[in-house]
Image (spheres, coloured by chain):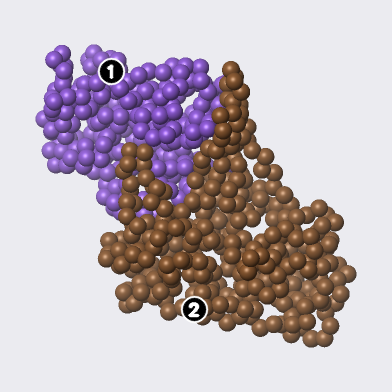
Chain colours: A purple, B brown
Amino acid sequence: MCTCNTATAAEDALMDVDYVPYRMRIDKVTAETPDVKTFKLVFENEEQGEAFTFKAGQFGLYSIFGYGEATFCVASSPTRKGYIECSIKCAGRVTQAFHQLNEGDIVGFRGPYGNCFPVEEMKGKNVVFVGGGIGLAPVRSVIWNVLDRREEFGDITICYGARTVADLVYKDELKQWDARDDVKTIFTVDPGGETPDWTGQVGFVPTVLGEADIPAENTVCVLCGPPIMIKFSLPVLTATHGLSKENVFTTLENRMKCGIGKCGRCNVGNLYVCKDGPVFRCSQLEELPPEF
Amino acid sequence: MTDPREKLVVGAGWQEKLVDALHGDNVRVLAPVLTEGTAEFREISAAAEMATEWINTRTPVKAVLFPRTEALVEFERRPGEDVQFTAADNEAVPTVVLGARPCDLNALDVLDTVFNWDYRDKLYAERRAATTFVGVACTRSDEACFCTGMGGRADDNEGSDLFVRPMPDGGAVLEVMNERGAALAKRLDGAAPAVGTEELVPPAQVGAGPFDTEKVKEWLDTHFDDDFWTDMSLKCLGCGACSYLCPTCHCFDIVDESDWRKGQRRRNWDCCSFAQFTKHASGHNPRPEQHSRCRNRIMHKFKYFIDRFGRKACVGCGRCIRVCGAGQDLVDILAEITTAAS
């Protein structure tokens, strides 16, 4: 797995954390679906913005003062500098408050924390992206990371599905990916979720993934979505398409408070999702107790 | 046990002298004080306020470094303006803790590890640097104590900056363990020398308990799924008292508390036995039943922490046994696991 955070922090002097977030201004709000919005955040302090770097797959604690902090991945690509984006599904107290915010409002961000997708390890390989619903958010960070350095990678396939057409996130970007000659796209909605003008496939993600033409050799996969989708997609990737579990990466999203291996909340066995993850190889997950 | 750098023999009245000297330096002095029938660490203005007969404080010494609740961020939202926020004032106060028990000071090793691995928790680290711990050998114990079973002992000087071995006449042998302890011992220059022999009050005899932590670890390594967890957790009310009073438990929550205009982001003690502890906003809960939460507590102390950091996260202080309203007994649990492993 990548060494983007633990190694650096251990080698250098320990980084002090006082839990005070960066001051971020909402630059843009995009309504993705009826219950998902994407927030583009810029640093109020330019120096902090210039010093800030992250890697695809890392996460942070986003907060609204008076409501609290919540954990989300950074959904934008590290190749796109000067801002970060997060896609938030309206679910609990903090996320509901986020959905009330407008451009120009101030929020907090702590991070980036956790490990990342091993993008460097993917160089020269075919990459298959499999996403379901809001699970496309962390995958999107890797997709743009890879597409912005397109020549360094082999065949690229994006397989994405949601319950209904309305629930597909990043609709404009789906069109952009679809329009490219150097990306193969498979978009699908669950049976019954299609509209009359839907031109993509109809069927669950594991089903359409099974019918896809995916090279078995030299291929890695980034997989993220609801647990049920991951459960049924994994055997399709390994048994049908011949990928090894070591080469299938996913992210876990356990509840967190600190993000830095102290608050004791996100552990799965002796691993902390916030420190040892959130990115795991599927072969690693098999060895963990089922507490995620 | 570690060999002290230096030993000092002082006669009765040394505590008075030390407390007065520290107050002269504007140092806050905390010591066990009898309150509501139990001892608690409180700020004292004179050594006479210190408890003389106590087994252990109800709340462990961890609360000095990692308080039950503390502000992290202050924020204010004025009408028509952007929210303003700043780090809360958490300046560490120079402090000397008198009368800390060996088990509690052993537990600081666990807290030091957690708050300093990879990232350094600034609030904890600054308090730690500003605090000197004077440990004192236990001369009494009760049936809940089991420090010896966890590798400790009633007169273990490990974790103390200055360690006190009491003498029957009120004098003591003081062991200087490090630089901080030496600085404190200097404040005792001129204390009355001890009278007569250096006979010590014998340390408390603490039983090791009918368990074997190595066997417990072996069993835990292979029994994540076992009916034992369902059975042992039936008693658990999920009240969290055991965690709150545990000297090694360090789980915390971060929450905002505010009115419409201003408020604080605060860190509060939390507990893995609470049903909401791991619950996602979606409703999904990785540890949905009490047995999965009780299992996590035992696993964390006797397996996960060892796997990760190389030591047990239990020091045998016995607080969880004393406080449990349902009569849950950690020693019984460890004994049952030992039997199952044999």
Q: In this view, does B60 lie to the left or right of B333?
A: right
**Residue visible at 37% across and 18% down in the picture:** A30
Quarter of the image where the C terminus of chain B is located: bottom left
Q: Name the residue under label 2.
A: B208
Residue A218 occupies quadrant = top left
Q: Mark 1 points at which residue?
A: A171
Residue A168 occupies quadrant = top left
Residue at the far right: name it.
B190
Q: Which amino acid does label 2 sit on?
A: Ala
**Residue visible at 39% across and 63% down in the picture:** B236
In this view of the protein, can residue B38 be seen by the observer? yes
**Residue visible at 49% across and 75% down in the picture:** B149
How far across and how far down the image is residue B182, in percent? Answer: 76, 63
Q: Categorize mark 2 by other alpha carbons within 10 Å: few (<14), some (14-19), many (20+).
A: some
How far across and how far down the image is residue A192, in percent? Answer: 13, 25
Q: What element carries label 1?
A: helix
Q: What element carries label 2?
A: loop
Q: Categorize mark 1 by other alpha carbons within 10 Å: few (<14), some (14-19), many (20+).
A: few
How far across and how far down the image is residue B280, in percent? Answer: 36, 41
Q: What residue type is labelled 1?
A: Lys
